[in-house]
């Protein structure tokens, strides 16, 4: 059977960290300009703290922010923050360079494609749909659905089951050595690490441990390996 | 003390019903075009039925739709539907003609303005913010916050309390005789009905009952009364 290629989404296909940071800063600027009575730097630090505590998929960061600063929720400031965040995020949303070329190349080689992501199912589909990449992927398997996050073996097992393919025929591509690659390896798959800035010591460790993890700069180089 | 003017939002300031209908139709078209295996007409009827059952503020109409048609949720179709719905809604979102002129006129006359709405607080602020009307309104009082919907007297009492003004100095403007106007009258306020297509019989009944409800075509005519 032809191999299946599984992708992480955030910071693998999309530069999520960069656009989320820009969107959050714009939202904070808007809230401060419209009366949140602390400085931009204070408000942005506080938001980062709240995201650290609640996780990035929590949907009430700005509620907590206004409540913390003002003692009660301020719905106008929350609405301003949310709208600005979403407008900037959607304006900046784009895949890494050559992503579309690589996905077309992989389909032309007969690979089946899917996503394995620690995130919310509809939010992850939304990113693919907004970029018009959704038709490339047969399945999106998320931690929300499966109940376990990468690197837990179970999310990889479940993804393999849903795609009807064996671990030995499957490759996981992601930007996190600890979650994407080690999780895949533990599930019996091979793996390719991208966008990682991995240290020479860790590269040596992968060699010493004889792990089936290849390292490239970003997914535009996948055609060298697949 | 200067009078306070309270507005309903949906179908009073914004043509909500029209843009929601267009947005829902576009979303259904997108879902059917991308594989929802029923006709447009069937899918749109089913969506209307689901909205009737769950209410328009329920946020999982498309989840229920895919589950009903397919036996299980389809997250890609839900994402396509949601994105299309929101894109079309925001593209069409605009106030009724001359709304901005009328709001400026009312402020120039010294009126204080607020909203009383059966809806979700942040969603209602979001509409005002997207239209850049938010700075006109001192407060947005919603049924979500207060726990009672118009025409319940309590939501009007609470709005008057938050604005610090007496019922005798306050006017409610809305498109629904039963909820906006009768609720306001019961709370001791006066009222103006807009966008209503009210029947001659009902107009006669208002006269017979000597209710303090004036009727105009739309809010562009408010300067004749205030």
Image (spheres, coloured by chain):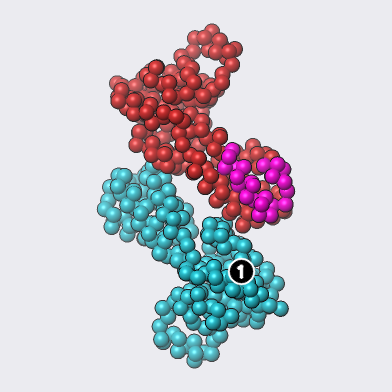
Chain colours: A red, B cyan
- Rendered position, B9 above or below A28: below
- The chain ID associated with circle 1 is B
Res. A67 visible in picture? no
- Give percent across and percent down for residue B83: 42, 48
Residue at the (30%, 25%) spot, across then down: A108
Q: Secondary structure at mark 1?
A: strand
Residue beneath disc 1: B114
Q: Nearer the viewer, residue B100 or B67?
A: B100
Residue beneath the point at 38% across and 31% down: A100
Q: Nearer the viewer, residue A193 or B59?
A: A193
| Horizontal side, residue B36 vs residue B51: left or right | left
Number of labels in the image equals 1
The correct choice, above or below, for B216 with respect to A42 in the image is below
Q: Is residue A177 magenta?
A: no
Task: Find residue B212 and report its horizontal and vertical position in percent.
Answer: 56, 85
Q: Mark 1 Cα within 10 Å, few/some/many (few <14, many 20+)?
A: many
Q: Position of residue A62 (x, y in %)?
A: 62, 48
- Residue B72 percent across, percent down from the top left: 37, 44
State the residue in front, A40 or A164.
A40
Q: Residue at x 69, y 54 (%)?
A: A35
Question: Is A23 inside the magenta-drawn segment?
Answer: yes
Specify start and end residues of the magenta stretch as a single range.
Answer: A21-44
Residue at position x 69%, y 44% in the image: A40
Q: Is residue A27 visible?
A: yes
């Amino acid at each position: 059977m032809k191999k299946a290629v599984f992708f992480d989404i955030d910071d693998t296909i999309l530069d999520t960290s960069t656009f989320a940071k820009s969107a959050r800063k714009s939202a904070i600027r808007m809230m401060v300009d419209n009366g949140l009575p602390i400085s931009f730097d204070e408000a942005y630090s506080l938001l980062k703290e709240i995201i650290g505590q609640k996780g990035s998929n929590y949907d009430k960061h700005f509620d907590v922010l206004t409540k913390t600063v003002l003692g009660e929720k301020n719905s106008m400031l929350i609405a301003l923050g949310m709208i600005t965040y979403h407008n900037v995020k959607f304006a900046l949303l784009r895949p890494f360079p050559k992503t579309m070329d690589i996905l077309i190349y992989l389909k032309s080689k007969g690979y089946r494609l899917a996503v394995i992501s620690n995130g919310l199912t509809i939010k992850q589909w939304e990113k693919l749909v907004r970029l018009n990449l959704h038709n490339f992927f047969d399945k999106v398997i998320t931690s929300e659905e499966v109940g376990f996050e990468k690197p837990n073996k179970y999310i990889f097992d479940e993804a393999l089951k849903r795609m009807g393919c064996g671990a030995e025929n499957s490759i996981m591509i992601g930007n996190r050595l600890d979650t994407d690659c080690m999780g895949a390896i533990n599930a019996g798959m091979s793996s390719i690490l991208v966008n990682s800035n991995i240290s020479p010591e860790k590269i040596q460790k992968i060699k010493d441990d004889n792990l089936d993890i290849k390292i490239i700069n970003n997914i535009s180089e996948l055609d060298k390996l697949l």
